[in-house]
Amino acid sequence: MFGDYSIGDLGSIFVMQGFAGLILFSVYVLMALGLAIIFGQMGVINMAHGEFMILGAYVTWMTSNFFQAYLPGLFAGYFFLAMILAFIASGALGMLVEWALIRHLYKRPLDTLLATWGLSLILQQAYRSIFGAREVGVELPQWMLGSLHVSDSIEVPINGIFVMALTVLITIAVAYVMYLSRWGRQVRAVVQNRIMAGAVGINTEKVDRYTFALGCGIAGVAGSAFTMIGSTGPTSGQLYIVDTFLVVVFGGAASLLGTIASAFSISQTQSTLEFFLSGSMAKVLTLLAVVGILMLRPQGLFALKVRK
Amino acid sequence: MSDDKKQGLQSAFRRKLLMGMAAIPALTMLPRPSFAEAPATSAINTTGLAVTDTEVTVGILHSATGTMAISETGSIESEKLAIAQINEAGGVLGRKIKIIQEDGASDWPTFAEKAKKLLVNDKVAAIMGCWTSASRKAVLPVVEQYNGMLYYPTFYEGLEQSKNVIYTGQEATQQILAGLNWVAKEKGAKSFFFVGSDYIWPRTSNKIARKHVENVLKGKVVGEEYYPLGNTQFNSVINKIKLTKPDVIFTDVVGGSNVAFYKQLKAAGIDLSKQTLLTISVTEDEIDGIGGENIAGAYACMKYFQSLDNPNNKLFVPAFKKMWGEKTVIGDVTQAAYLGPWLWKLTAEKAGSFDVDKIAAASPGIEFKGAPEGYVRIHENHHLWSKTRVGRAKLDGQFELVFETADLVEPDPFPKGYQ
Amino acid sequence: MTENRFVNRSELIGILLLAAFLVVILPLCLDVFRLNLVAKYLTYAFVALGLVVCWGYCGILSLGQGVFFGLGGYCMAMFLKLEASSVENTKIQSTPGIPDFMDWNQITALPAFWQPFHSLTFTVFAIILVPGLFAFIIGAAMFKRRVGGTYFAIITQAVAAILTILIVGQQGYTGGINGMTDLRTLKGWDIRPDHAKIVLYFFEVGLLFVCIFIAQFIRHSKLGRILVAMREKEDRVRFSGYSVANFKIFAFCVAAMFAAVGGAMFALNVGFMSPSFVGIVPSIEMVIYTAVGGRLSILGAICGTLLVNFAKTSLSESFPELWLFGLGGLFITVVLAFPNGLAGIWTDYVAPRIAGLFTSRKSKSGDGWAEKPVADGAPAE
């Protein structure tokens, strides 16, 4: 299939395709970070993760409408405020859910799956009742549209760069919080030995609540970022959930580095395959490879211990 | 509920009776109590449909919940509008239309189940409904078995024809060929790149488009790609498009994927005012979600745009907005759904009966001069004669009409040479 | 030696009540349309029954039961579709004699893997063995490596996602997202008219009871005790010298086969099969039926399936916009407050009262319906 193209063409396609893979990688990391915290650290299977993301997307949509109506002069910068609001909204909802639902189920991880599935149904219907069944389009400020013109055949989408930068920023922030801050130490202490952590004076309930809220908040930011590349509708969240779980499990649930590595390998495999095969088959083969590897190496890429 | 059950029991009895006497012509056998003051009812309803002296019941069967609710809401709205208008104008054969609405919940077996409920329990005279091909395929055996009448609004892949279905949308050749001819002539297009969602309608449409491009237009298809429904990452296919530099990108991506596709296309620097893109799947409804700024400049090929300038449409659009809100938009399928109740009314009046067999037989040749798209007529094959139009998307989410066929295009669900 | 009996008394009463309900009361009270709906719900009851065996008894939560339901259903549908696609039925096609969706996708000859499905005998074996084998492969790969609990759940979910995309993507061979529609006859016998629906209903109920007895047998045999022991303390069973993995594989395969029988009955009763039963959403819904009814109780799971589906149909008929709220709320309530589902409510609250009404002597209440402790997949570490 390459016979018809010049070396220059191929080179630029190679660059562009690598870039496409990087965007997919950023998307996966953004989706998976929140889940890696909730699932990896707390062992809670949050099937409503996608709905928390969509909440962030809806918050972004509302913010953009508000700016258009009342502060058109500041529209160019609304996105930053929207992301903060998305974080707060999803985080607050997460806190509420933890309080009402999750904290009763820590000893029954599989049941959190069922309960959060019920929650996701309720949230979907709530979005539908409030925002309508139709998808909403989020208008972006002018500077985020379009692309950087590198050469005749290489164009770098600006929102792609934005998503990547955001991913790096959030990853660094999460790594800092989890591994360097005092609070992160408390979280890890609770994960490793809840009783002992309680005994040395850590308020485990509070740690749980804030960890869950943090995970949901990051989901909200991810949702906010996705309005740039995807669609926002009541059921959009469901599309992401399997991919996200696979990324986390494939990486080795308790490891942040693992999540990043697995997001990288999955996204590069998929975007490379997509170039040679049709989109559907690329997806099937990628998922098959992931499941196959997980069968051979159930602990994932990076794991602290073999699990049951 | 208990009434429901009672009715069900009666109908079970009636059906057993029917089975036993299948050989006797239906007309003579049904032991219907005929009320002295309404001989008309027994004359226009000989098969036990839900028709009283003042009312006739019609079913609406779309997804109010689930992923397809996004698309089907518009159809529900316009069907209700049409029925309200018909009732205001005196109803059908002197009877007001009563609606029973069922939710298909974006789930094909549910569609089949609800269709059966509407036909068997509720005895509706007609069903306005279905949207996706899959839901129609699920419902089709049911309406054929229980002899119902389905008015199906969506443009679809063709390869189907049934006594019990009136297709008010366009079939694939009707929709696509005129549009392809237009880009070939107007833009001198020789090479095409196809992108679609992975299911029967895009695949069949692209198959027809490919045959037309290769055999009739003597052009070349340089790529054909399919993505799973709901896919949101199109960067790879966009790179392939950049590599192959087609004259025309021909798309039939559906649903939420559209949003991702056009946003990413724009972000990748493909300027739709320079690159010709012809879509057969984006109506005003979809642009609402995509955002006018992301798709402005693209061409869409279908039979109706909200911006059409004709007297019927000037009445239809305000009426729709008055009923459903100023912000609503009207796409091709929404308009086609509006035709269903009207065509059924006109057919019933021509046939002088609500009986499904008579409606089916009377359908060919029915003309609806009040259609927002202009004039339509039902063909012998139960599809509609209609014009095909090409519109160009504008920033405000509306289309600007750039081309329409001079004559009505004949529907051809089993096109020779395209299979 | 009462524990070695096939069923104990309270279970026997329950089964007889269920039999009376399904065989006598429902057919008398419902018209054919509603009875056919019950038949459709009951196909999910097979899956729920399988989940009782593998999730309730053994603690393996599979979120991919739709895969097996779908495989069974597709095997059946392939046979029926071939029969419906006789040359005279399909003479308008460019290649008569092959299923319509193949013709639409320019396939001109029946693919090799379709050929054996001309035979009903082969089909019946395939319905059981294909999903069984598939479950064996997944189970062997996972359980031998001691993967369980949440990981297993997520991987089965991924398998469901893969199979859905594959079926949808390979539409020339599978009918794609439309599925296989318009199934007509079984060996020349029309499955669509009302009397056929009634016959199929009773046949299905019969099969369901066969499966119930198999599940009962497993439950009361030594095997069942080992399964429960594994759920409670996997390590101790392992240290006692049992091969934990093999028992888990067995339970998973049984669950898969039950689901497959349900799928095949679905294809017969409803007259089509589509990938919308294979994916993640239906798989989780089937787990929910089991959870609502009671994951530890065979009868509970079946009643739960019937109840949730009935609620779904009637709620969505009267309040289409609101039924998701109700359904979501129901799941949360059940999980939070009644982890053993309806059967748990029965054993904990109702049965003791009834027992107290009829007899004053103190008896061990409600043995057999459901054990007390809340079981959840992986044993706590």
Image: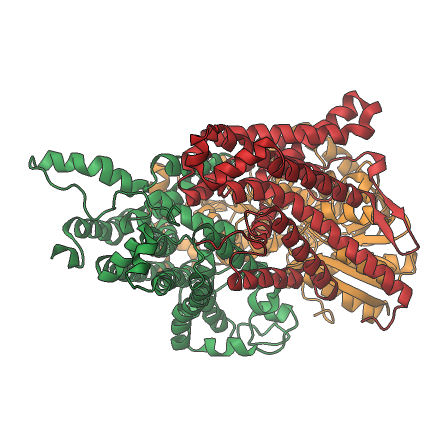
Chain colours: A red, B orange, C green
x, y percent for residue B387 = 78, 52
For the residue pair B132 and C251, the one nearer the viewer reads as C251
Q: Position of residue A252 (x, y in %)?
A: 56, 52
Please tell me which residue is depicted at 85% across the width and 61% down the height of the picture: B243
In the image, taking residue B370 as reference, residue B48 lies left or right, namely left
Looking at the image, which residue sits at the far front?
Answer: A200
| Image quadrant in which you'd find residue C291 | top left
Question: Is there any visible trace of residue A282 in the rendered image?
Answer: yes
Residue C111 placement (x, y as % from top left): 57, 77
Please give the name of the residue rendered at 76% of the width and 38% of the height, measured from the top-left corner.
Answer: B312
Q: Is residue C185 left or right of residue B304?
A: left
The answer to which quarter of the image holds residue A250 is bottom right
What is the quadrant of the N terminus of chain C in the image? bottom left
Figure check: C370 above or below B20: above
Q: Residue at x 44, y 37 (%)?
A: A194
Camera-side residue of A14 and B76: A14
Q: Is residue C322 left or right of residue A1?
A: left
